[in-house]
Amino acid sequence: MIKSMVLINSANFSFLNLNLQKDLFFLGENGSGKTTAIRAIHYLFSRDGRNLGIPNDKEGFKEYYFRYQDSYIAYIFEEFFIFMYKSGTEIVKVFSKQLFSLDRIMDEERRLYDLEAIKHYLKEAPLKKNCQIHE
């Protein structure tokens, strides 16, 4: 079961750690990120950035959620996590069979480590799988 989702420099969030272990109710002003968070969750299960209800006049999933080279999404489960990042113009999704540690992505002042250090952390897992997202 999914435990949480972390968005870093993704969509309009500089940092969001969303606990998904309990019943969840989204409440907020228009433009506060409710739909953005729901689409990121839906993407995990659909894997189709074109089928998320994003209007044609808006940026697509890849462009909006991974606008920057340091835009990341992590889907955290009990004993593994899925980590997504931008490499050039493509989005890479890494399955990492280890416990997720936010301390390995950023320091206590929320400064991100460089991507090579993060990739090194991802590779420490006993089981990992990389795949590119093409839309």
Image: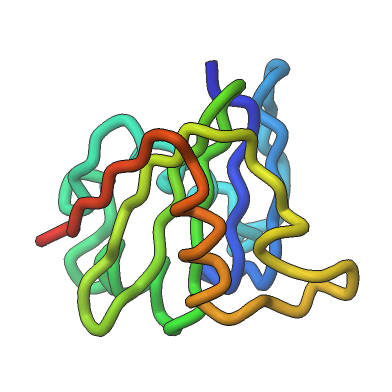
State the image quarter where residue 51 is shown. top left
State the image quarter where residue 47 is shown. top left
Left or right placement of residue 44 versus residue 14 in this view: left
Q: Is residue 34 placed above or below 99 in the rendered structure? A: below
Return the residue nearer the eye: 96 or 40: 96
Left or right placement of residue 74 versus residue 44 in this view: right
Return the residue nearer the eye: 66 or 115: 115
Q: Is residue 109 placed above or below 36 in the rendered structure? A: below
Residue at 64 percent across and 41 percent down: it is 100
Left or right placement of residue 118 versus residue 64 in this view: right
Give residue 48's position: percent from left, percent from top.
18, 45
Residue at 18 percent across and 58 percent down: it is 132
Toward the right, the furthest residue is 108
Return the residue nearer the eye: 113 or 41: 113
Residue at 57 percent across and 72 percent down: it is 117
Give residue 21's position: percent from left, percent from top.
69, 20
Q: Is residue 58 placed above or below 125 in the rendered structure? A: below
Give residue 69's position: percent from left, percent from top.
43, 83
- The quarter in which the C terminus is drawn is bottom left
Return the residue nearer the eye: 40 or 97: 97
In this rendering, the count of numbered labels is 0
Residue at 58 percent across and 58 percent down: it is 7
Give residue 64's position: percent from left, percent from top.
38, 71
